[in-house]
Amino acid sequence: MPKSYIAEDLGWSIKRLAEPFAELLREGFIDHDEATRTILIPAWFEHNKIDNGNQLKKARAELSELPDSPLMKVFAQVLEPLPEGLHKHLGEGLAKRYGNSGTGTGTGTGTGTGTEARPLAGAREFEEFWSAYPNKAAKKEAKKAWGKLKPTISLAARITEAVIATKATEQWRRGVIPNPATYLNNERWEDEIQPSTGSSSVDRALAIAAKVEAEEARA
């Protein structure tokens, strides 16, 4: 969904949307993939229950129409707490598109030497990382760090997933976020992610809404 659509629905300008949108990202209410214009709301199913088969069919159909994005792997994690039936039916669509490490047939010949080259991540994977990273500082240095790291495609996906998960931590929500080059050079995606100890998501959403209203009143 382009930001221009959001702004139009709200009757706002793009400039007015920028700060509330950035704050929603910092607080972990949403994740955004700029490249595919995809927005993920991690708590969606907490407030939008699937109560019948028709709703489930509709959800699966909409899921199949979504563009390829690194957020889809994060979405798979969002599905895990759902009841087994919902998790299974919604997860099947993801497995068909992205594969499932637990569904292999075991028919390989075992003749590999273990030295085969694994595909390296390219510009697209870097842009996915950059889109997910909340502190967009010194992109040139970040590209240098990425090039020095030479991540495989699987490692690039793991790095981006770690960034998305870390955005919900208390430290990053306070804005204490290293520059992306520092994050890469120090392999910070390996850090243990500490869960947030802050207020509930509803309380934080209300706080953001109150802040925006206050700013509008002063304008």
Image: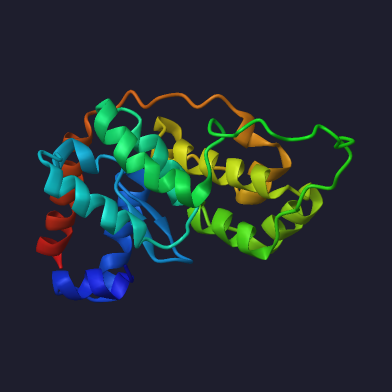
78 and 148: which is toward the camera: 78
Residue drawn at 10 percent across, 38 percent down: 51
**For residue 37, side relative to residue 19 (left or right):** right
Q: Residue 197 in the image: x percent, y percent?
A: 33, 23
Colour scheme of the picture = rainbow
Asked if residue 82 shows in the view, the reply is no
Q: Quadrant of residue 155?
A: top right
Q: Quadrant of the C terminus?
A: bottom left
Q: Residue 148 in the image: x percent, y percent?
A: 81, 51
Q: Residue 85 in the image: x percent, y percent?
A: 26, 30
Residue drawn at 37 percent across, 60 percent down: 66
Q: Residue 134 in the image: x percent, y percent?
A: 47, 51
Residue drawn at 21 percent across, 50 percent down: 57
Q: How many marks?
A: 0
Residue drawn at 79 percent across, 34 percent down: 109
**For residue 97, side relative to residue 13 (left or right):** right
76 and 195: which is toward the camera: 76
Q: Quadrant of the N terminus?
A: bottom left
Asked if residue 15 shows in the view, the reply is yes
**For residue 178, side relative to residue 15 (left or right):** right
